[in-house]
Amino acid sequence: MNSKVSESSDAGNMTDILMPTLRLFLSTLKEVVKRPSSMVGGILLVLIVLTSALFPLFMHTDPLAQDLMARFTPPVWQEGGTWQYILGTDNLGRDIFSRMLYGSRISLIVGFSAVLVAELLGIILGLISGYYGGKIDAVIMRIADIFMAYPFMLLTISVIAVLGPSILNLILVLGMSDWVTYARTIRGSVLSIKRKEFVEASRAIGTPHPVIIRRHVLPNVISPLIILGTLRVANIIIWESGLSYLGMGAPPPMATWGRMLAEGRVYITDAWWLVTLPGLAIMLTILSINLLGDGLRDALDPRLKNL
């Protein structure tokens, strides 16, 4: 009997979290569709994600395969180009197109995974800090101040220099270095929400604090998290590219956009595509995420809905 009660309670807890999230997702999707710029950003981002995820099914070109006889082959639309290498080759004869597609997978995986790590850590600490307050709030916020006082990129470089470059280390370091932004955002929202009448009423009738946080506080702080998380993905991708450019991203010989920029800068006057094409890929990805993020902000912020 107790096990059945426990199972029904767990199911109810999941419903309390999933149903508001699902309703928020559907209403947000309707608002985003109404905005052309956010639609363009969303479609472009979906195409980038699908292309990076599915290209191994249709392309069998090894991004690490070298062909020294085909060094510095230009893109197909330029004189000397060939359909075998649509976007040309680099100084070792490696296919630029397959390397860009492979690099997109790394940038997107690192971007979304690091944001997920930062959000989970920031949500937990921000909820605890804002709801309970007092000494707990003071300790968490002072730790946040220490993180904020240390330059983000310098902190990331220092940690990766000790741990060694790898995708997992990159995700963990970028995620754990960026939690302060989410924690402060959540804390500010919680400080406002916990004074609302429905929260005070739940507390007055003896509802446990974890239940109040799960049912009343957390659903009301999801909106700013979605907006912030979307925009921070773009920042993480830029930081990942910067670290790869410095040789502290994914370990070689893995192809990343940042490493392609670093390797191609030496030949920029003779082979413009080595730097220009990866740079355009980074720009389009960041642009699509920012356009989608602006649309989500307009859709989720009630103050902007009537503007």
Image (cartoon, rainbow, N blue to C red):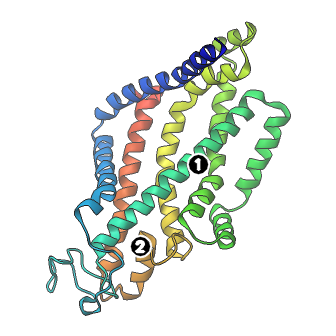
- Above or below, comparing residue 291 to residue 153 in the picture: above
Disc 1 and disc 2 in contact, CB within 8 angstroms = no
Taking the spot 43% from the left edge, 56% from the top edge, the residue there is: 108
Q: Which residue is mark 1?
A: 117
Taking the spot 28% from the left edge, 82% from the top edge, the residue there is: 89
Residue 194 on image: x %, y %:
68, 21
Foreground of the two, 65 or 278: 65
View extreme (front): residue: 1
Q: Is residue 286 left or right of residue 159?
A: left
Mark 1: few/some/many CA within 10 Å (<14, 14-19, 20+): some
**Disc 2 element:** loop
Foreground of the two, 256 or 253: 253
- Above or below, comparing residue 122 to residue 48 in the picture: above
Taking the spot 54% from the left edge, 49% from the top edge, the residue there is: 115
Any mark on residue 94, and which? none
Residue 306 on image: x %, y %:
38, 25
- Above or below, comparing residue 161 to residue 131 in the picture: below
For marks 1 and 2, give the CA distance.
24 Å
Residue type at mark 1: give it.
Answer: Val
Residue 66 on image: x %, y %:
32, 85
**Quarter of the image that includes the C terminus:** top left
The quadrant holding residue 30 is top left
**Quarter of the image that includes the N terminus:** top right
| Residue 205 is at least partly visible in this image | yes
Taking the spot 57% from the left edge, 30% from the top edge, the residue there is: 221
Mark 2: few/some/many CA within 10 Å (<14, 14-19, 20+): many
Q: Which residue is mark 2?
A: 255
Residue 237 on image: x %, y %:
47, 59
